Amino acid sequence: MRKHLQGIDHVVIAVADLDQAAADFERLGFTLTPRGRHTMGSENHCAMFAGDYFELLAVPADHPVTRYYSDFLAQGDGLAALALKTDDAAGFHAELASAGICAAPPVDFSRPVILPEGARDAAFRITQVDISETPGGLVFACQHLTRDVVWRPEYEEHANGAIGLHGISVLTDAANFGATRDAYERLFDRAAEGSGQDGRNWRVATGNTPIEVRTPAAFAEQYAGLEVGRRTLPFFGALHFCVRSLAQTRSALELSGVEFAARADGAIAVGAPLTHGLVVVFTELSA
């Protein structure tokens, strides 16, 4: 494990219509932060948990920094990026360089946040890993410079009982399965655990939220009957959350009229299009 890497900080779901996406994820039982506007023109809502979060991101204006997301959306909404948790973006960049992994030098950006005590800027320092190093989507390390602005207790309670990220699945074809798995082993400096070479049981530890590598056939077995975005392989196809109580999750989904499927492992899952191009899975913490 790398010294300046503590796991997954947040994930980015790129959406064409931020208002619709916000309404859909609120139907799923998530509490979202007010709309934020970044200095490069992008806009977002976030669902915050105690140690991580996910972000709904729209890019209404063209900008070189957000062009990846504009290009990504040409194939539809979906899980576009993983943000890694780091205590030192510059130190992490140096670690990657010493390992021969290409990444851009750290840059700073911010967005204003309206709080009860007044407006403040949420500030970040990021270093972006070259897209060629991470099959499935963009990966960057995010150092929070103003954590007290981003993590607010009033946004951490969710009707569906979600308390954090639990797993990420990346789909890749059988021919490139080994290379995809190896890329994430290299990035996190961790050996994958599993068996077989067909994408059925392999996962890479990240420090908190593991990344599963699966072929489409293995993914279909795990998420039977659930629609996922139709993107060019490889891509991030599923996002797992841990919840306090699946009974609470079921109740919240039923109250909103959301259809869901029960999995063999006891988890429940919701498929696209309500989830905007990915499968969302809820697993009870004790499960």
Image (spheres, rainbow, N blue to C red):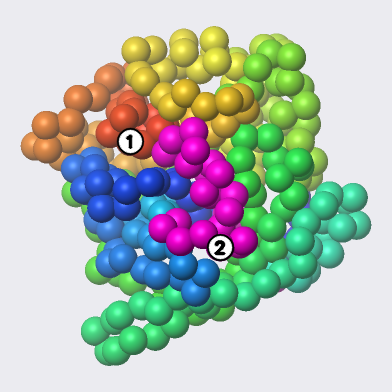
Pointer 1: what residue?
275
Circle 2 sits in a helix, a strand or a loop, which is it?
A: loop
> Which sits in the foreground, 250 or 14?
14
Residue closest to the far front: 62
Question: Relative to 127, does residue 231 appear above or below in the rendering?
Answer: above
Magenta span contains residue 83: yes
Q: Where does the magenta region start and end?
A: 59-88
Circle 1 sits in a helix, a strand or a loop, which is it?
A: loop
The three-letter amino acid code for the residue at tag 2 is: His
Question: Relative to 47, does residue 117 appear above or below in the rendering?
Answer: below
The three-letter amino acid code for the residue at tag 1 is: Thr
Foreground mark, 1 or 2, reads 2
Left-right relation of 2 to 68 = right
Pointer 2: what residue?
63
Question: Relative to 91, does residue 2 appear above or below in the rendering?
Answer: above
Residue closest to the far bottom: 117
- Name the N-terminal-most of marks 1 and 2: 2
